[in-house]
């Protein structure tokens, strides 16, 4: 396996410190990663590591795992209809980010990395702080000063160093990248790093197994940089390439109206995603005005006949409260997908299997 630039084809070793192409700033991918093979699923392993043979692990890597993944898929009656809730907030650090982090930190440990830097509004950094603590790797986190106090506290309690950065989310990204460029730390970006993205594919593979080895008709997920939805889309593409499903599920991106670059591009029929102005939303986990994987996600939405849906702050808050009355306590970022389902549902029939991924625990944002 190697790291390659998807734009110019430049090649890098698997343990490169580059987070985008050094020639052209293109996104980096893993070339030569294993293909999906159902015969290689370790059915005795009740975590996402049941797919270890299909993950891009360096030779001899030992998994840094706390039993993450294989989260429940729960049929949920809501607003007089039914969807399946994928409870990805039931992870060791309380969010879906652990899918990517467990794969990334396992790779970094095998590379001998001693220190990482990362920027995050909270969940990705909390996840990285948890797994680096587990792996005895030092972590330096750059987070918006306005992020949920509960998330910032969680990161610090794991033992990571928290640098609070004023202003919009993008300021934290710039600070982390500067720190990585200056020192010897590995920039463990949850949205640029291809190991982290590979881990996100396991969500699709789990849905496929849990639904009796078939794909749902549609999947709805909140989208910021888009690694969750992109991992899901790629995971189902793997299943189709392996001849295990005929059709890809329709994928729907849920965004907050305040920060909705993908929904705007989709509504206008663009083939690329222009950046929007940075802004704040209670869906803090997806307050991303310049999504790293925006163009590829837009292509996935169009190819699957899905869509992108922007919802108001009020609709997000209402969906958070209403879903709690159905027993599921999630953070506002996750509730964006439930609010989007309320708009998209007219496109579904009663027989359609629709999955909403619930990405973060409500306990992380009780103040909002
Ligand atoms: Zn390049």
Image (cartoon, rainbow, N blue to C red):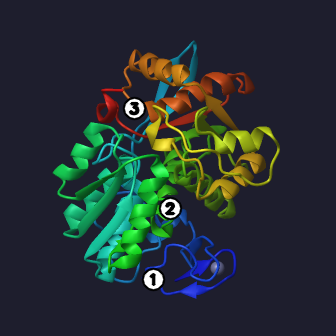
The response on whether ligand 1 sits within 8 Å of label 3 is no
Report the disc number at residue 16: 1
Pointer 3 local density, CA inside 10 Å: few below 14, some 14–19, many at least 20: many
Earlier residue among tags 3 and 2: 2
Taking the image as drawn, is residue 317 in sight?
Answer: yes
Query: How many angstroms separate mark 3 from mark 2 (CA)?
Result: 22 Å
Taking the image as drawn, is residue 251 in sight?
Answer: no
Query: How many angstroms separate mark 2 from mark 1 (CA)?
Result: 16 Å
Q: Nearer the viewer, mark 2 or mark 1?
A: 1
Query: How many angstroms separate mark 3 from mark 1 (CA)?
Result: 35 Å
Which image quadrant for residue 153? top left
**Residue 275 picture location, percent across and down:** 66, 51
Specify the quadrant that holds the C terminus. Answer: top left
Q: Secondary structure at mark 3?
A: loop
Earlier residue among tags 3 and 1: 1
Report the disc number at residue 331: 3
Q: Give whichever of 209, 323 is nearer the camera.
A: 323
Disc 2 target residue = 197
Q: Secondary structure at mark 2?
A: helix
**Vertical placement of 136 versus 79: above or below?**
below
Pointer 1 local density, CA inside 10 Å: few below 14, some 14–19, many at least 20: few
């Amino acid at each position: 396996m190697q790291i390659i630039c998807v734009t110019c084809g430049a090649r890098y070793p698997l343990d490169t410190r580059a987070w985008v192409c050094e020639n052209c700033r293109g996104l980096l991918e893993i070339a030569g990663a294993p293909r999906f093979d159902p015969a290689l699923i370790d059915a005795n392993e009740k975590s996402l590591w049941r797919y270890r043979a299909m993950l891009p692990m360096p030779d001899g890597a030992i998994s840094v795992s706390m039993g993450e993944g294989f989260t429940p898929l729960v049929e949920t009656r809501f607003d007089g209809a039914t969807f399946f809730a994928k409870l990805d907030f039931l992870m060791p650090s309380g969010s879906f980010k652990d899918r990517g982090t467990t794969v990334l930190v396992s790779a970094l440990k095998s590379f001998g990395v001693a220190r990482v830097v990362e920027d995050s509004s909270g969940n990705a950094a909390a996840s990285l702080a948890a797994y680096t603590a587990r792996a005895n790797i030092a972590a330096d986190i750059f987070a918006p000063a306005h992020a949920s106090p509960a998330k910032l506290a969680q990161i610090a309690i794991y033992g990571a160093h928290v640098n609070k950065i004023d202003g919009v989310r993008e300021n934290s990204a710039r600070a982390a990248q500067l720190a990585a460029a200056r020192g010897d730390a590995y920039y463990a970006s949850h949205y640029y790093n291809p190991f982290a993205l590979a881990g996100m594919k396991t969500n699709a593979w789990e849905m496929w197994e849990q639904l009796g080895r078939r794909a749902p008709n549609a999947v709805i997920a909140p989208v910021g940089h888009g690694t969750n939805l992109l991992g899901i889309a790629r995971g189902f593409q793997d299943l189709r390439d392996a001849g295990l499903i005929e059709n890809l599920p329709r994928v729907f991106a849920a965004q907050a109206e305040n920060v909705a670059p993908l929904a705007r591009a989709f509504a206008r029929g663009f083939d690329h995603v222009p950046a929007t102005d940075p802004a704040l939303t209670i869906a803090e986990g997806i307050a991303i005005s310049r999504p790293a994987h925006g163009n590829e996600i837009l292509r996935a939405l169009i190819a699957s006949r899905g869509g992108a849906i922007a919802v108001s702050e009020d609709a997000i808050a209402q969906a958070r409260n209403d879903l709690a009355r159905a027993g599921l306590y999630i953070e506002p970022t996750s509730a964006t997908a439930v609010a989007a389902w309320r708009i998209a549902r007219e496109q579904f029939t009663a027989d359609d299997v629709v999955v909403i991924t619930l990405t973060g625990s409500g306990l992380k944002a009780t103040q909002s």
